[in-house]
Amino acid sequence: MLSAFAVLLSSCGKTERILIPGQEQVPEQYRFYYLVKTSGDKQLWGIEGVIDEYPKASKDQSKESEPPKPIKIRIAPKWEAAEVLGKWGGFRLLKDGMWHAYSLDGKPIGELPYFSKCETSIPNGYPHYDAMLKLETPDGIFMAFQDTKVLPRRGNFPVYTCFGPYQQAEFGYQGYFFKEIDEFDEGSLWGYNAFKEDSNEIFYELGPGCKSIIELADTRSYLTAYYFLVERMNGWEIVGRKRTKPTSSYYQGCLFMDHLPIGWSLETLRGWVEQLPDGTFDNLKLNGNVYSFRGFWDAENRIGFLTNSPQKK
């Protein structure tokens, strides 16, 4: 998506409507635009578009539901910048160095704090939410899950479930790594959170206290073959998730497409850690496995994930 900070050519005092990139395939009557008001060398930003408002359901079940009505949305051009939030989950508008989150119907998203920086991650594997946001604020880092649900009188509108603040947080494969705020500045350890599929809550996959965490996930198994390689203060261990608790050779074999070495051991995995390149990688070969892996490894923070590749390398 093109940055909302792009320089626009316009005459003094004129307000322009600029089609937001990605809206080209939307029916014309429902497209969203940036409003850009120019005065001299100063530009102020806003949003304009149309959404369907769904009428309140009738208590009389014999009556047909009324069709939705289009309503115009307008956020006045008084902001320093404007951008799309998450995966078309609303907008973020800049004022005095802080971003404010607004929904598609032009209302503030109260679940999200004001933030100075935002990163977006689209879920991997078998997603049960649309996107995840990493929000940097003066109080710490917040992680928010964006989920499209049917809301009363609004239709399919993204909603947000936000958690934090954290001292440090990074996107994972199906959730996020986090370090809690350490008031004594002794250096906190990593934990891992994921999002419940049936409610707007999180649950600990791994409570804080891990020196190293590597997610291991079979991309074809709908997370039946999914577990963690974890280094705690007393050494390394494999921690399973859901159907993988306790971890079994069957599910471990699923992850590695049944080409797991017969001499499976934690020593084998520890050896793999030493082979992981720093950063994002594709087609990584590890000893004892004929298939390649993709993922990432943060060597400094000692967090990352490995997923199997569907192709031999």
Image (cartoon, grey):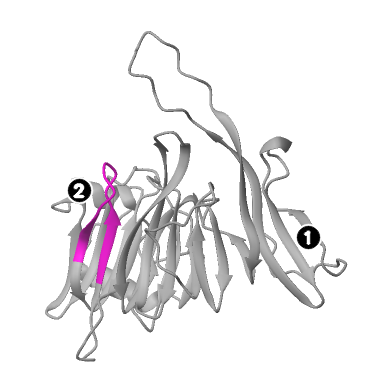
Q: Give the residue number, with chain letter if any, for mark 1.
A: 15
Residue that protrudes farthest toward the right in the picture: 11
Q: Name the N-terminal-most of marks 2 and 1.
A: 1
Badge 1: residue crowd in 10 Å (few <14, some 14–19, many ≥20): some
In the figure, residue 179 lies in which quadrant?
bottom left
Q: Which residue occupies 86% across, 67% down?
A: 9
Residue 203 inside the magenta-drawn segment: yes
Residue 298 position (above or below residue 33): below
Q: Give the residue number, with chain letter if any, for mark 2.
A: 242
Inter-mark Cα distance, 2 to 1:
54 Å
For badge 2, the amino acid type reads: Lys
Residue 214 inside the magenta-drawn segment: no
For badge 1, the amino acid type reads: Thr
Return the residue nearer the eye: 229 or 100: 100
Badges 2 and 1: C-beta atoms under 8 Å apart? no
Residue 265: x percent and y percent?
A: 20, 65
Residue 223 appears anywhere in the view: yes
**Circle 1 sits in a helix, a strand or a loop, which is it?**
strand
Q: Which residue occupies 45% across, 48% down?
A: 130
Image check: 245 left or right of 85?
A: left
**Circle 2 sits in a helix, a strand or a loop, which is it?**
helix
Which is in the foreground here, disc 2 or disc 1?
1
Residue 224: x percent and y percent?
A: 27, 45
Residue that protrudes farthest toward the bottom in the picture: 185
Q: Which residue occupies 29% across, 44% down?
A: 197
Q: Which residues are magenta?
A: 191-206
Badge 2: residue crowd in 10 Å (few <14, some 14–19, many ≥20): few
Secondary structure mostly seen in the magenta stretch = strand
Residue 271 position (above or below residue 89): below
Residue 306 position (above or below residue 104): below
Image check: 246 left or right of 28?
A: left
